[in-house]
Amino acid sequence: MNQLLILASNSLQRKSLLRQLGLKLKVMPSKIKEDIPPALPPGMFVKKLAEKKAIAVAKKVGHGIVIGADTIFVCGRNKFGKPKNKKQAFQMLKQMSGKKLKVYSGVAILDEKTGKKAIDFEETTLEMRKLTDGEIRAYVKTGEPLGKAGAIAIQGLGAKLISRIGGHSSNVMGLPLHTLGKHLKKFGFK
């Protein structure tokens, strides 16, 4: 397939995951305001935000297949996106410590030329170890939690915080490869 594939994200992890699939892509962050109503159920929330990102980039490029994605962690009734600073990262991790979590990643694929689109999400469960304040502070001090949904980078040091993953780890890293691959086939990608 010679169609241009555009990732509507500046996430190094998403870019890396797509390249692992052998896909050539252009990266163009959406820079949208993430103002989806927080009362939406988590799956709908990430789908709406992924779609909003894909649409914003598709309008700029005018052609190609655009992929938008969004990820949140859910602990009880709380949804956690990216922490704004180290203090917020500490608070998120403290609240999730020792708990079962759900991670939702939404993905939207949009063909700007034809208007064809596919929007879906994937859910993964995690069990987080019970962490001491010292462990949380040490992890936050590394800077790794910043820019990561739920303040956890399972592809890095954050892997030590998790005792169990139920589902696809790529979903926790921010891009549900299983779901994405299923839908990319509909757009002519192998």
Image (spheres, helix red, strand yellow):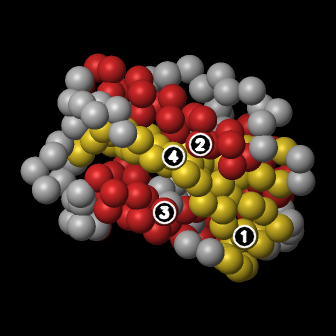
Nearest to the eye among marks 4 and 2: give it: 4
Q: Which residue is mark 4?
A: 119
Nearest to the eye among marks 3 and 1: give it: 3
| Number of the label disc, if any, that sits on residue 47 | 2
Nearest to the eye among marks 2 and 1: give it: 2
Question: Against 146, is 61 above or below?
Answer: above
Disc 2/disc 1 C-alpha distance (Å): 20 Å
**Picture coordinates of residue 164, whole percent (x, y):** 71, 79
Q: Residues within 10 Å of mark 3 (few under 14, many from 20)?
A: some
Quarter placement of the C terminus: bottom left
Identified by mark 2, the residue type is Lys
Earlier-in-chain disc, 4 versus 3 = 4
Identified by mark 3, the residue type is Thr
Disc 4/disc 2 C-alpha distance (Å): 6 Å
Picture quarter containing residue 114?
top left
Given contact means CB atoms under 8 Å apart, are the residues at marks 4 and 2 in contact?
yes
Earlier-in-chain disc, 3 versus 2 = 2
Question: Against 72, is 159 above or below?
Answer: below
Report the side of 120 relative to 72 (left or right): left
Identified by mark 4, the residue type is Ile
The structure residue drawn at horizontal position 60% and vertical position 35%, both measured from the top left corner, is 48
Report the side of 29 relative to 21 (left or right): right
**Residue lying at the far right of the rendered structure:** 76
Earlier-in-chain disc, 1 versus 4 = 4
Secondary structure state at the residue bearing disc 2: helix
Given contact means CB atoms under 8 Å apart, are the residues at marks 4 and 3 in contact?
no
Q: Which residue is mark 1?
A: 126
Q: Residues within 10 Å of mark 1 (few under 14, many from 20)?
A: many
Who is closer to the viewer here, 6 or 11?
6
**Picture coordinates of residue 29, whole percent (x, y):** 37, 31
